[in-house]
């Protein structure tokens, strides 16, 4: 509740536009139907219902499904409604680009969800880049050995036999500093991808994608008579918490997971929705209806026994454990840093904030994982050194991890650093690709990096309230006049207009600016949840537009999603059943770009906008702002490609304003760092995305829920 109050107060202080503004002669006038609603949450709710009401209705029905397979099918139908709303355009996944690396393939987990893929203690690294030939052989062997627990040792022998020397350090580049070192109070990847190397979870995925015990040694599951489900974990004995200086502080015990869960719910850092409705009384505690945390379904029976009580048999529960919301927190260390629990944890209180230092930097957290942070210099270096008290220190391959900052302004920096041995691998952007070919190393060393399940998107702001960055009014200023911005607001509220924008973007050309022409389609995605993310476990019959439709056991999520899109006659190709050798896929092709569709949907939008007082023509175009990082040649070229697509498709009726961000920080503050929708300084934002937290489509779709429950809804300018 404290969070909601803070959000409302923040929203009341924002610079907003006068709804009418100066009239543009001949272009009509638009009056925002929500303009008189002063309460930000109420206004957000009404806008949400208008743009995403169909999605929410379908998604709520999916959550009432009686079987897992019915749930998956209904969620696919709900996602079709999300895509049809036009609030986002799926763009790319991570990976799918040319790369050169010293890191052996598949020596960190390739699990598609959670943060375990950023745990680097068992990666295997050579002193020289690994050749394409040897990498191909290792990948084939991984597929053969997967699940046997023998791949890691095989790789060591293989590389040594091939003449490589293995090393115990790993250096890589990064582009955004962690803002918060409290993993339980953040939802930003830049934070959690660093912190995950400082603690262990209950269970973690190994390099063969098998879920293995970590701080737990075993668990038991029990379905209770009342429908609740209990998971009882035995906690590993003898594990130590240490300070940033390596001094042993306390033993890890079951209560540390209770303390961590309570602090996560108190802090409301953005991922608390993962346990709402899942853990007994989690929603009630977060809402303030339950104030006694002992009533929440997480308890330590003794130092070695931890019990979670779930509201239902969520079959994906174990897949969630690699994510930060289930991290332990040393209660004694937290309180020594001024931390309090429940209503007393009030960071808005000035006196409390003065004494509360937990998570403010790496010196103010306790460590139970393989590494301690020994250096953290902003926009420069982060160093992780082996934790001498780590319970499994004898079995880690990497003793030191170094992150080196790269702001992206020099398109060849990562490549040159990789060649020099300064970092251990890099993706090849268009410039680096050309240089690698000139240097004669491309053919022998390159490989195509695997794509992951991340969904980067273009998001459309349907409730823009500010026109400069919220943190500094002098940065990233929109060129729109108040009257132009008012017309843009009307257009962005129109579903057909948003879909027209999506159909107009040639995402292949757009993506080629960063990955090169050869691979421009490889990392393209066409849905929010990957089409192959889950399959039906049994035959299922569901209604599509009122008609009973059967889907057989083994049907992919994407096929059901496409069936609903086709039934609704929305020309989005989110699933190709012939892709990937006939397996089917939602990625690797552009199923959205179609200039004819863009023109047709714009024509529909123009007719609808005329009815609300907005005339659109080449003489009176709609202005749309896209912030971009001008300091990066690749990102600047990508923005120019975006602009040209609009010029080609819309014949001057829609103008894309490329709003210059001179530093990566300015760019992030325009669209990535804002915590609430009303702080977004853009009409289109193409620098944010989502990766799954666990192995269920709800890991994606929950992010689009209203009332601050959905983390990505803020990208639409609401909540």
Image: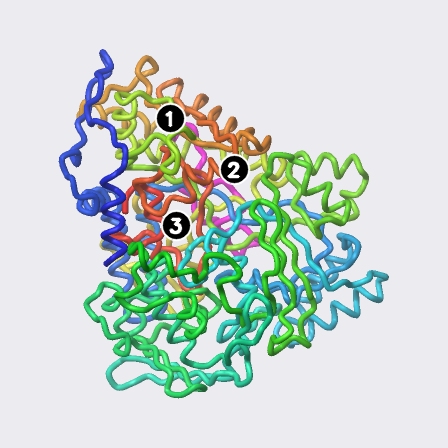
Q: Is residue 429 above or below residue 445?
A: above
Residue 570 is inside the magenta segment = no
Looking at the rendering, the stretch of residues picked out in magenta corresponds to 572-598
Q: Residues within 10 Å of mark 3 (few under 14, many from 20)?
A: many
For the question of whether residue 704 can be seen, the reply is: yes
Disc on res. 280: none
- Which residue lies under the disc numbered 2? 664
Is 675 on the left-hand or right-hand side of 554? left
Percent position of residue 257, x then y: 41, 75
**Residue 424 horizontal side relative to residue 354, left or right:** right
Closer to us: 484 or 197:
197
Which comes before the other along the chain, label 1 or label 3? Answer: 1
| x, y percent for residue 61 | 25, 60
State how far apart marks 1 and 3 are (Cα): 38 Å
In terms of image quadrants, where is residue 603?
Answer: top left
Q: Is mark 3 on a helix, strand or loop?
A: helix
Q: Disc 1 designates what residue?
A: 478
Return the x and y of residue 314 as percentages of the image width and height.
Answer: 35, 72
Q: Of the residues tagged 2 and 3, which is closer to the observer?
A: 2
Q: Earlier in the sequence, mark 2 or mark 1?
A: 1
The disc, 2 or 3, on the residue closer to the chain's N-terminal end is: 3
Give the main secondary structure of the magenta stretch. loop
Which of discs 1 and 3 lies nearer the camera? The answer is 1
**Any part of residue 566 in sight:** no
The x, y position of residue 283, in whole percent, is 26, 66
Residue ID at (23%, 48%): 53
Mark carried by residue 562: 3
Say which element carries label 2. helix
Q: Which residue is depicted at the point 34% across and 30% down?
A: 467
Decide: few, some or many residues near mark 1? Use Cα within 10 Å; few <14, some 14-19, many ≥20.
many
């Amino acid at each position: 509740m404290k969070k909601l109050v803070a959000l409302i107060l923040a929203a009341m202080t924002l610079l907003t536009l006068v709804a009418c503004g100066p009239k543009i002669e001949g272009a009509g006038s638009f009056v925002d139907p929500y303009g008189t609603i002063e309460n930000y949450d109420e206004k957000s709710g009404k806008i949400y219902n208008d743009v995403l009401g169909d999605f929410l209705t379908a998604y709520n029905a999916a959550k009432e499904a009686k079987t897992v397979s019915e749930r998956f099918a209904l969620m696919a139908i709900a996602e079709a409604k999300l895509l049809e709303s036009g609030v986002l355009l799926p763009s790319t996944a991570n990976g799918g680009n040319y790369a050169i690396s010293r890191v052996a393939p598949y020596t960190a987990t390739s699990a598609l969800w959670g943060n375990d893929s950023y745990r680097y203690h068992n990666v295997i690294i050579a002193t020289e880049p690994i050749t394409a030939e040897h990498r191909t052989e290792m990948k084939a062997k991984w597929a053969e050995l997967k699940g046997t627990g023998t791949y890691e040792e095989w790789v060591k022998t293989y590389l040594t036999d091939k003449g490589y020397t293995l090393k115990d350090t790993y250096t890589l580049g990064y582009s955004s500093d962690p803002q918060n070192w409290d993993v339980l109070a953040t939802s930003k990847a830049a934070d959690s991808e660093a912190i995950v190397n400082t603690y262990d979870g209950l269970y973690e995925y190994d390099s063969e994608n098998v879920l293995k015990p970590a701080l737990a040694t075993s668990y038991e599951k029990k379905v209770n008579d009342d429908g609740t489900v209990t998971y009882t974990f035995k906690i590993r004995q003898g594990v130590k918490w240490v300070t940033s200086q390596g001094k042993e502080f306390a033993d890890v015990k079951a209560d540390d997971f209770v303390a961590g869960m309570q602090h996560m719910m108190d802090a409301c850092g953005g991922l608390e929705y993962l346990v709402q409705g899942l853990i007994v009384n989690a929603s009630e505690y977060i809402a303030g209806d339950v104030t006694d945390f002992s009533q929440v379904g997480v308890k330590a029976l003794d130092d070695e026994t931890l019990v979670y009580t779930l509201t239902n048999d969520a079959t994906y529960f174990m897949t969630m454990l690699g994510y930060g919301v289930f991290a332990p927190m040393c209660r004694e260390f937290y309180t020594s840093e001024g931390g309090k629990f429940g209503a007393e944890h009030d960071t808005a209180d000035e006196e409390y904030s003065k004494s509360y230092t937990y998570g403010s930097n790496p010196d103010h957290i306790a460590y139970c994982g393989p590494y301690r942070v020994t250096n953290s210099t902003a926009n420069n270096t982060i160093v992780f050194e082996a934790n001498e008290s780590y319970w499994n220190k004898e079995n880690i391959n990497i003793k030191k991890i170094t992150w080196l900052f790269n702001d992206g302004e020099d398109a060849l920096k990562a490549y040159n650093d990789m060649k020099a041995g300064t970092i251990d691998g890099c993706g090849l952007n268009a410039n680096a690709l050309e240089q690698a070919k000139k240097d004669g190393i491309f053919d022998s060393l390159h490989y195509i990096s695997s794509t992951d399940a991340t969904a980067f998107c273009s998001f459309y702001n349907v409730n823009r309230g500010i026109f400069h960055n919220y943190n500094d009014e002098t940065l990233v200023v929109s060129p729109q006049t108040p009257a132009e911005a008012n017309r843009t607001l009307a257009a962005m509220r129109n579903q057909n207009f948003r879909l027209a924008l999506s159909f107009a973007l040639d995402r292949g050309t757009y993506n080629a600016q960063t990955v090169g022409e050869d691979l421009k389609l490889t990392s393209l995605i066409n849905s929010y949840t990957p089409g192959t993310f889950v399959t039906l476990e049994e035959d299922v019959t569901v209604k599509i537009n009122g008609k009973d439709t059967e889907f057989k056991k083994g049907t992919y999520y994407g096929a059901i999603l496409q069936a609903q899109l086709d039934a609704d006659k929305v020309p989005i190709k989110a699933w190709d059943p012939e892709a990937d050798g006939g397996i089917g896929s939602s990625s690797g092709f552009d199923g959205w770009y179609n200039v004819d569709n863009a023109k047709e949907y714009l024509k529909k939008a123009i007719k609808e906008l005329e009815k609300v007082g907005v005339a659109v023509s080449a003489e009176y175009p709609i202005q749309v702002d896209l912030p971009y990082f001008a300091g990066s040649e690749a990102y600047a070229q990508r923005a120019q490609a975006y602009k040209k697509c609009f010029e080609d498709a819309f014949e001057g009726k829609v103008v894309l304003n490329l709003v210059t961000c001179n530093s990566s920080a300015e760019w992030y503050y325009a669209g990535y760092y804002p915590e609430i929708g009303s702080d977004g300084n853009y009409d289109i934002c193409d620098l944010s995305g989502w990766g799954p937290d666990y192995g269920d489509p709800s890991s994606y779709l929950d992010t689009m829920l209203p009332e601050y429950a959905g983390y990505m809804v803020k990208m639409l300018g609401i909540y």
